[in-house]
Amino acid sequence: MKIEAVVEEGQVKEARSSATLFRGIELILRGRDPRDAQRLTQRICGVCPTSHSTAAALNLDSAFGIADKIPDNGRIIRNLILGSAHIADHILHFYVLAALDYVDIAKVAGYEGTSSVLNSVKQFIERGELGPFFPRYEGDYRLPEEVDQQMVAHYVEALAMRRKAQEMLSLFGGRMPHSVAVVPGGVTEVPTVDKVVSFLWRLNELRDFIDNVYLPDVLALAEVYGDYFAIGKGCGNLLSYGGYELDGKEPDLTKRERLFKQGRISTNLKPGEVDPNRITEQLQHSWYASSTANRNPSQGETEPEEGKDGAYSWIKSPRYNGQVYEVGPLARVLVTYARGEPTMKSLVNSVLARFKTSPDALFSVLGRHIARALSTKFVADSMPGWLLQLKPGEPVYIGYSIPEESQGMGLVEGARGALGHWVELKGGKIANYQVVTPTSWNGSPRDDKNQPGPIEQAIRGTKIKDEENPFEIVRIVRSFDPCIACAVHLITPKGGKLGEFRVS
Amino acid sequence: MPKSMTEELPVIWLQGAGCTGCSVSVLNSVSPSIKNVLIDEVIPGKHINLRFHPTIMAGPGEAAIEVLEETRQQEKGGYVLVVEGAIPTAQGGIYGVIGEERGKAVSIVSRLESLSSNALAVIALGTCASFGGIAAASPNPTQCLSVEEALKAARIPTPVINVSGCPPHPDWFIGTLASVLLFGLPKPEDLDEHKRPKAFYGALIHEHCPRRAYYDEGKFAKKLSDPGCLYELGCKGPVTYADCPVRLWNHGVNWCIGSGGFCHGCVEPAFPDLVSPIYEKIALSLATLMEN
């Protein structure tokens, strides 16, 4: 991903978000056996493959006509696998992908205590070869020395925790990344008592970390960097597909009961419905043939056209009713909150009380990080209940025959937000497969009406204190948790390059 | 302060047309942990200095790109280049870029060529980098090549080690890197015909599979989630060289076949096209597969 920001008199006048990699997975899927989609679509992303595996399974369930027949054990195990992935992913994001913008590892050089972890980091610093932590921006690390050192220790702990969450996932998923057990019809792995208990105690360790390390760290950071409640607001419209099936009998996933609720919401917190037919992908500023523009993904086409006039990204511009929407943990947390889910209401309200603020402050850099942590806790706390509903010996999978002609759709809240898979079958093979990822929504370029995408809007208007070290921009982009490596440019209106920086 | 006595091995990690799964898998290394690899002397007296990694490095783009150039020049012949993902070559390589120079995007191909020529060795990590993999799957819209193919086309003689897998097991990568640190570059006889370390890729999954007795007795699972041999449901264990049944995955908790989600041959050059459809059984001989 590349972000270009034009800065004039210390303020971002304009921003462009562009994806600089194209592989054509949608094209690669054409003509294949539809069951292969569960395995192949995971390779769209190795950080969030489970989101794709789940969306693909739901997509094929609907195409094969079995969406209301998945055995409960299968439904529950899919939820446990996805939940494990969310836990791993969110811990990775906060500590490994975002925290180094706020936490200064160099402060460990002054550590005088007995922690072997911190002493080994101190020795690392003394040896002087500091990649991959340097080079980096300088000038805005505000945490007091002891808090900062403790955060570094938590970073190291987080590396182990996200690894453990993937091990927990593998109990049912087979392995991570690119698990194998989630399939159309249910799952392939059976629940046994020892797996249930092993999963439970790994989950308990992770919940302890979430409650006593991760969430408190996010809130502590928010206390020190409180100005970031007013930075990076974005487009102010959020969309959630909802996720984690609580009901196995409803074939239509827009009506199905789910843990996270489906809906759209703005700063007024009045939730609206999501009708997937109102999603279109606009292409004016994307490197795809304009003749294929403005289609719902169920009829989408992928015809790359690099060098197209005015285009600047490999990402299309997904829009709902022609409007710009942001997706992600913030979206699913606030939609679930606004729909009155009691646990979520209590979680969000306690945060708002602590910071003495109202929900619209959550439309910000800090709001996204806080929502991500709340989303992690909300899922992790739901998992023991699901785990204990498993019935060893009962089926996990139901067979099916592949229809010659069919259409399917799978919508899920992946770690990064709303993820949709659509398939059309002809002659029992994939005639068309379209994927709209959360980063497509968030990182989208300008659309046909020149409306900038969510990240572009979030950066525009931001005041930059130090153009040599534009912390504000990297912090905004990383709050969205974009799923691709990202490089950022900072240029003056005359085009002279002041600095370039990379956001991951 | 006395100069450090630690021997540093600089590593540059490039991402081509891939998914970052190989990186995530390496993060799952247990012993050594990724913290041990990045921060500690992973072998006494030796430290791996990861200077460039697009996903986990802290730094800003221009300064990061400078790291590439500094390393290329100052550590000539002394750094290891790790490449994850395949190398897109269609339309002059515009389908994948890594940063810019003088305002112009620099393609992955170009970065690979300039960085590999001065490297001690290139580790092609993952099946995409080793053999093309998913990025190069039919119809290969971006004309992806494997690292070895791309280096051959550019006549760059730097030795390549393929640590394939989609993703590779973290032990295969860490083990290969440790071997370089302890014993230097692998000798030709340490690698198989596909330049993969025999230590990890020397035996078929089928040879050590705990379900092999079922296969030998003809007890085949008829539908997913049933016990028994998974060959009739599509298992590619008989044509796949990897030590998964012995090493297991994710700290030994499970593995693909163990979960009933059978092997799909992800370490092989045949992955994915020649082992597809994934859910259909295939011929038992790799030779037959590769002929077709």
Image (cartoon, coloured by chain):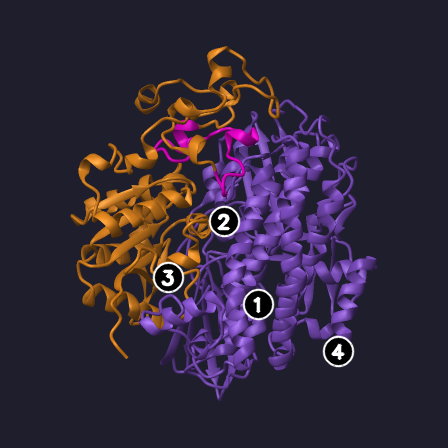
Q: Does residue A327 appear anywhere in the picture? A: no
Q: Look at the magenta stretch and give its main secondary structure.
A: loop
Q: Earlier in the sequence, mark 1 or mark 4?
A: 4
Residue located beneath label 3 in the image: B40
Which chain: purple? A
Do the residues marked 1 and 3 share a common chain? no
Q: Position of residue B283 (x, y in %)?
A: 40, 18
Q: Quadrant of the C terminus of chain B?
A: top left
Q: Which residue is disc 2 drawn over?
A: A45
Q: Alpha carbon of mark 4 to alpha carbon of mark 2: how far?
A: 36 Å
Q: Amino acid at mark 4?
A: Thr
| Residue at horizontal 20 percent and vertical 54 percent from the top | B120
Q: Which chain is orange?
A: B
Helix, strand or loop status at disc 2 = loop
- What residue would you read off at disc 4? A357
Q: CA distance from mark 3 to mark 4?
A: 43 Å
Report the span colored magenta: B249-275
Asked if residue A107 is positioned above or below residue B233 in the image, the reply reads below
Q: Is residue A195 visible?
A: yes
Please tell me whether mark 1 or mark 3 is closer to you in this view: 3
Counting every numbered tag in the picture gives: 4
The residue to which callout 1 is attached is A479
Estimate the spatial distance between the alpha carbons at disc 2 and disc 1, rounded to whole Å. Answer: 19 Å
Task: Find residue B139 and name its label.
Answer: none
The chain that hosts pointer 4 is A
